Amino acid sequence: MAAPLPDIRPDSLLLTRRSRITLFCCTAVLGYLLTGLLTTLLIYKFGTANARVLRIAAIAQDILALIAPALVTAMMVTRLPAQLLELRGGVPGRLWMAALPVMIIAAPAMNCVIEFNQNIEATGALSAIVEKMRAMEENASAMIECMQGNGTWPDLLMNILIIGIAAGVSEELFFRGALQRLLSTGGVNVHAAIWISAIVFSAVHMQFFGFIPRTLLGAYFGYLLVWGRSIWLPAAAHALNNTIYVIAQWYYTRTGTPDVTVDNVGLGDTWPAAIASAIATALFIATAYRMRRR
């Protein structure tokens, strides 16, 4: 079982449990609307096929829709916002060494989960929703591909900063630092808080065919917050995961060989890699749990 997060002092909380969640939801919706407005104006003026515009929109989303709601809510609901968001260091080095390699080791096993998710067939009214989500997912992929630019080294560095690091840190601050912590400090069981946050994290991406693997990824980040008692551990893991994707996409753009992809490792004839990946991932996660801060 995960070690429970230390509860924030009750006398530091300024609002009721329901009011804290309501305030967070309102600030998140406001941030999302502001991001949508700014993105619409940028696309209207410069078009979608512009890597610089899409990067500006991504930065705006990180700030307005993710970082700002988390910080504003934390400052309004408690006298100890840094403690609520777990903005502390001191994560043991052994925990870093056990937690971060999972983002690479788990790839073949995760590819099997992704393939399973993609093969799920929706029926009835749900099929129309899924098809709409598929179109949204394809549009999002096209925008990310556009953000890759021309495959130059400056493009790679810029995308690592924006898609890799900034997106990873801001999403963790929002989903784990704010949402998960608001739930766990509001009386919700820590495991329930982790999985609720993970499901919301996956659902917000509006990508049905990656819902299950993204939920599992979000849950792992949630447990890293619990075990490390610092937002920087899941933020680093998330940033590493995003950065691996950015580098892979940059390589495909630079070499023109999109058919050569790590997404196939663990599938088909390479199934032994998936089994080895699953076993190694379980061992590293178990080690991370043993190395948790007590």
Image (cartoon, rainbow, N blue to C red):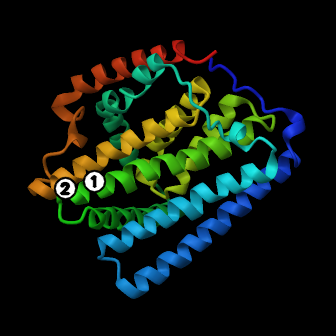
- Tell me, yes or no, whether the two marked residues, 2 and 1, touch with CB atoms within 8 Å: yes
Give x and y (percent) for residue 132: 45, 67
Q: CA distance from mark 2 to mark 1?
A: 6 Å
Which residue is painted at 24% across and 32% down in the image? 266
Whether residue 123 is visible: yes
At label 2, the amino acid type is Trp
Q: Nearer the viewer, residue 179 or 235?
A: 235
Which residue is painted at 27% across and 63% down in the image? 145
Whether residue 119 is visible: no
Label at residue 157? 1
Which residue is painted at 22% across and 35% down in the image? 265
At label 1, the amino acid type is Leu
The quadrant of the picture occupied by the N terminus is top right
Task: Specify the quadrant of the image occupied by residue 26.
Answer: bottom right
The quadrant of the picture occupied by the C terminus is top right
Q: Secondary structure at mark 2?
A: helix
Give the answer, above or below, for where 94 lies relative to 215.
above
